[in-house]
């Protein structure tokens, strides 16, 4: 599904079920909270922290989807065409980093 379609799907959901968008500052705080939940799972499941029993059933995909949902809300609220912006960013990164990572000895260490 295209990012534009995802943005439209979120907007439709907000109009039908969400009453209205939370303001941008509230959504920024919610985004921070959701990223924190992702970080908690990653740190415990893949990092060096031990996983608490209460965290063992947390679904990383669901938490990442929460992050995506709020990002899409913020894009809609700020009239940002996220697909266009993402494509532009990929062009910039590709041009800028074409050989940068390939030549990074740190990445080639095993």
Image (cartoon, helix red, strand yellow):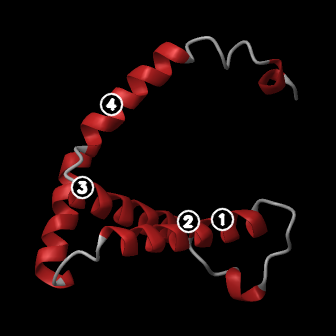
Mark 1 is surrounded, within 10 Å at the Cα level, by few (under 14), some (14 to 19) or many (20 or more) other residues, namely some
Residue tagged 3:
78
The mark closer to the camera, 1 or 3, is 3
Mark 4 is surrounded, within 10 Å at the Cα level, by few (under 14), some (14 to 19) or many (20 or more) other residues, namely few
Separation of marks 2 and 1 at Cα, in angstroms: 6 Å
Vertical relation: 5 (above or below) 77:
above
Residue 60 horizontal/vertical position (percent)? 57, 67
Separation of marks 1 and 4 at Cα, in angstroms: 26 Å
SS label for mark 3: loop
- Is residue 1 among what the camera can see? no
- Is residue 13 among what the camera can see? yes
SS label for mark 1: helix
Residue tagged 1:
39
Residue tagged 2:
35
The mark closer to the camera, 3 or 4, is 3
Q: Residue at x 45, y 64 (%)?
A: 67
SS label for mark 2: helix
SS label for mark 4: helix
Which quarter of the figure is the C terminus placed in?
Answer: top right
Mark found first going from the N terminus, 1 or 3: 1
Check whether the beta carbons of the residues at disc 2 and disc 1 lie within 8 A of each other: yes
Vertical relation: 101 (above or below) 35:
above
- Quadrant hosting residue 12: bottom left
Mark found first going from the N terminus, 4 or 2: 2
From the viewer's perspective, is 101 left or right of 84?
Answer: right
Q: Residue at x 52, y 71 (%)?
A: 34
- 56 vs 16, nearest the viewer: 16
Separation of marks 3 and 4 at Cα, in angstroms: 18 Å
Mark found first going from the N terminus, 3 or 4: 3
Residue tagged 4:
87
């Amino acid at each position: 599904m295209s990012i534009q379609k995802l943005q439209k799907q979120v907007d439709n959901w907000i109009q039908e079920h969400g009453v209205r968008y939370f303001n941008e500052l509230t959504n920024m705080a919610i985004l921070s909270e959701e990223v924190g939940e992702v970080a908690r799972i990653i740190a415990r499941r893949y990092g060096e922290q031990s996983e608490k029993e209460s965290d063992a059933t947390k679904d990383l995909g669901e938490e990442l989807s929460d992050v995506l949902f709020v990002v899409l809300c913020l894009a809609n609220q700020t009239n940002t065409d996220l697909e266009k912006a993402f494509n532009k960013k990929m062009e910039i990164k590709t041009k800028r980093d074409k050989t940068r990572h390939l030549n990074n000895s740190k990445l080639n260490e095993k």
